[in-house]
Amino acid sequence: MLETIVQAVINGLLIGGIYALVSIGVTLIFGVVKIVNFAQGEFVMIGMYISFYLATQFGIDPILSLFVSMPVLFVIGVLVQHFLIRRVLGPNDMPQIFLTFALSLLLLNLSLMLFTANYRTVHTSYSDEALHLGGLYIPVAKLIAFVVAMALSGALWVFLHTTDLGKAMRAAAQNRDVATLMGINPNRVFAVAFGAALALAGAAGSLLMPFYSAYPFVGQVFVLMAFVAVVLGTLGNVIGALVASLMMGVAESLGIQFVGADSGLIVVFAMLLLTLAFKPNGLGGGRVR
Amino acid sequence: MTNHRPQSGLNDKEREGRRISSKRPDRRKFLKAAGGALAAGAFGAVPIRGWAADPVNIGALYPTTGSMAQIGVGCVAAAKLAADMINEAGGIKSLGGAKLNLIISDVQSDTTVTRTETDRLITSNKLSAIHGCFASALTLIASEVCERAKVPIITGSSSDQLNKGRTYTFTPFARASQFAKAQLQMSKLVSERPKVAVIFENTAFGTSTSNGLKELAPGEGVEIVMFEPYSAGFTDASPLINKVKASGANALFSVSYLNDLILIVRTVKQVGLNIAINGGSGGFVIPDFYKNVGQLAEGLQGVAHWNHDMDDNAQKVNAEYKKRTGDFLFEYAGGLVAQTYMIADALERAGSADPQKVREALSTLDVSSGFAAMAPGGKVKFGPDGKNVYGRPLGVQWQNGDLASVFPKEDARAPLIKS
């Protein structure tokens, strides 16, 4: 029994690491640029296809293709922010919601046209391997994904707290007008934030590729969890999103194990509802950021 | 005993279509059609071959765009191959060597399009017979239109529904209810006392298929030790496989779409669980499955209504198909080569291209040799419900990147490998 619980927690933590990369991206954009990016999942999908094609065309390991997918998505992020998001930033939320939602639909349909609805998988030497410890097992591909995801999250935190640009991002998030008065160029900061968030989505895509299939709708699976995690972990709070993602992974896994295999999402959303009812600002409390 | 598997062998693909929300693929299909990727999509049926003599028009309804396109394209390739083979052998002799003129129509993986396309195909051409559509959901609709227009349709789709109250619909291959039974019987090859875990996605397809298995299990002496729905498109199969492990099952039936099945198969390997997996039919028995899953597919079992290793004729057609497309001839496409020969046999005996007379001839079809008899058991004869009275499914297993027939004993071409 204990072994089953421990195994379920391990499974949950490992998949929670991937949820974290997606949700940190969403929360970063929300915290800094103050918009909800509905297209975040589609950027995960793009990251997956980049890794898929690099792996099948050039034999590059999907994990290593992170070094391609992250910069590519960073650039896409900067371009999207500069040419699209910047134009709709203003007091009215509606155009922003429509813009990112339209972007999501556009990317979905483009990928359906370009890649078709077929499932694509990459088979690496470690895709099916697992470490066995006593009665427990840890899939290698997921372990790598988890470790890299945690390292990237940590790197982002260090960036936000130690570099001038990171501090400028946090300042712009706190108060855009005052930050501008202090000589911070908000457009530059927003572009970097958007780029960084998309780079994380790209990383999630590359890390998923050794053990998950790429298809045009794949992003929607993860973005749903990401939004829940972002709300749970307090909107705009990077650490909150990380912790909430891991919690959700574990809750989902325990739910499947002990309630029923079609109840994973029920457990997650019950958690969300309870949190909203008793801690409406999310588990991070009132501290936004 | 009826309707345990409401959809054809290829229901996985149907579900993929369903999962994609309604508007998006339509737009994509429109773009594709408008772009001229397939003129048939925009302008209806286009004869792919014109003959100076009096050809016999055969309609072919397959989804060559949309979510089922992967299999639909393979079906069209097989349909062309079958028509070429018959024409090269001299056509329909009783009609003065008339050639078969295949008129292909793209039903776009969509039920509404299937209705209008079938209608258009029939009204704008003088057809002798139709074959299609591979996915039961589509075939059921095409069959309705054919019944009304009094044009015979012959199909490999497995829904038992196709044998109810129809006179122009012919199904030469195993029915859905027979597939569930075959799957259960196969589990007895693996173990004297099979303990089966059934996991299924919580959709209409998953639920009805798994319920069919559950109902038939006691009669077959198979114990179901776990019966668990899961959310289709999950991100992690580990908790589910943990449960399978805890259930002590020695066989696993997974009623799943390809993506979920890949996760399940990988996780079983990672957990180090030694269990015989049966993935059913549909997307599981096409070459693409192996391309996606690779080595892991080895030893996986499934069920099919046709397989390329059945007999010499099947192997001959398979070799030709392989030459043309590079892949082995998969279940549905192989079956439709046989179907084309059944139509040719009926035309030959009818001595007329009139659809009514072709129907009469099909209803009295009785073959036990030649390409028309390429079916498990090697005999085809239709009962009053349009069902092949000899129809039975095959148990198959992935062996060395190929599908081998392993069940029942009389159809087995290779021994079952127990993992």
Image (cartoon, coloured by chain):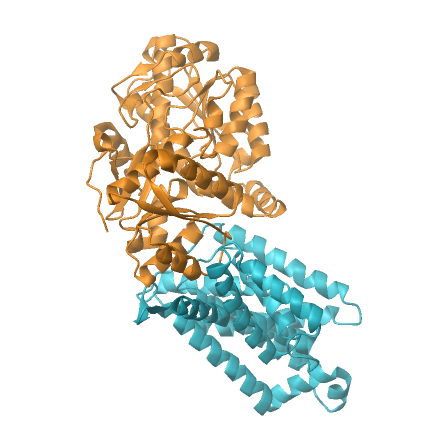
Chain colours: A cyan, B orange
Q: Quadrant of the N terminus of chain B?
A: top left
Q: Which x, y percent locates residue B309?
A: 24, 35
- The answer to which of B408 and A128 lies nearer the viewer is B408
- The answer to which of B265 and B282 lies nearer the viewer is B265
Q: Which x, y percent locates residue A155?
A: 51, 83
Would residue B90 appear left or right of A116 to someone viewing this image? left
Number of marks: 0
Q: Is residue B393 above or below residue B302?
A: above
- When asked about the image quadrant of residue B392, the answer is top left
- The answer to which of A183 and B193 lies nearer the viewer is B193
Would residue B398 appear left or right of A152 to someone viewing this image? left
Q: Is residue B305 above or below residue A83?
A: above
Q: Which x, y percent locates residue B413?
A: 20, 36
Residue at 56% across / 40% down in the picture? Answer: B33
Q: Which x, y percent locates residue A70?
A: 49, 73
- When asked about the image quadrant of residue A169, the answer is bottom right
The answer to whether residue B149 is seen in the rendering is yes
- Report the residue that reaches farthest toward the right: A91
Would residue B318 appear left or right of A100 to someone viewing this image? left
Q: Is residue A81 above or below residue B174?
A: below
The answer to whether residue B73 is seen in the rendering is no
- The answer to which of A8 and B130 lies nearer the viewer is A8
